[in-house]
Image (cartoon, helix red, strand yellow):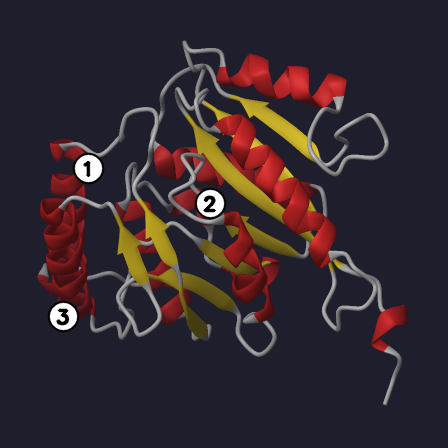
Amino acid sequence: MSDLKNIAPAKVLIVSPTYNEIESIGNLINRISSVRNALSDSSREMRYEIDLLIVDDNSPDGTARYVKQEQSRGVSQGDSQGELNWLHILERPGKGGLGPAYIAGFTWGLTQNYDIFCEIDADLSHQPEELVALLDSLNGHDMAIGTRWIPGGSVVNWPVMRQFISRVGTGYARFALRLDLRDITSGYRAFHREVLENIDLTTIHSQGYCFQIEVALRAHRYGYSVAQVPITFVERVGGVSKMNRKIVVEALWNVTKWGFGRYRYRR
């Protein structure tokens, strides 16, 4: 058996879109700093070298400015070099939607030769500590989705109506698209780079959370295997949710079109 400790750690890029997340961005950076130290430990069988990319849509509250201050000061917990050289920021000119933000981040990361890509919400509804299980599940799978609606998954302090919308929406998408994914809109994910290279990000036009559905659908149509990893989803404690009626309508329309319409989704 080869000595796994001599294998170079996989290069991981976590992409986190932001718009007015000043209340949570500092905690996100600190918690990911702790996780990245644990995941690079030489005693681990699978090791990861983690970077974080913030994709900011010109937040009026100064989110981007805070990230750049963190980069220069190196004040995050666990940083020993006085500089957060693993923290990056990509600034966009305005609020352009979740899907385009992720595509911009993934495109940047693909040019930087990362091996694995992750998605995470900046509002800390996704627990950074659960990255360990998400990344490890890629050993044997092409993609991993953090899932609330399976044994071991849960939600905390999430309004009943939001839970209802999520469950009904997921159920409808599973039925229409014939996908056995229990949380198809989840935004806590990990991918091997080959998935993002092959699903053709340039032709994805979903703006809101429908982006998550479209990516999962494309991955399925290309035959990629998906691990469903239980996570705990915690309602944000600061800032304002970006969910609105337009996002819901976009998802409902596209899922119906792809599943039943004359423009049935094809790769």
Residue type highlighted by circle 3? Phe
Q: Earlier in the sequence, mark 2 or mark 1?
A: 2
Disc number lying in front (2 or 3): 2
Which residue carries the number 2 mark?
A: 120
Q: Position of residue 143 (x, y in %)?
A: 49, 66
What x and y, as percent, mark residue 142? 53, 70
Q: How many marks?
A: 3
Cα gap from disc 2 to disc 1, whole angstroms = 18 Å
- Residue for badge 1: 247
| One can see residue 73 in this view | yes
Separation (CA) of disc 3 from disc 1: 20 Å
Which quadrant is the N terminus positioned in? bottom right
Residue 204 placement: quadrant? top left
Q: State which tag comes first along the sequence, 2 or 3.
A: 2
Q: Look at mark 3 in the image and give the residue it sits on.
A: 175
Relative to 137, say whether 63 is above or below. above
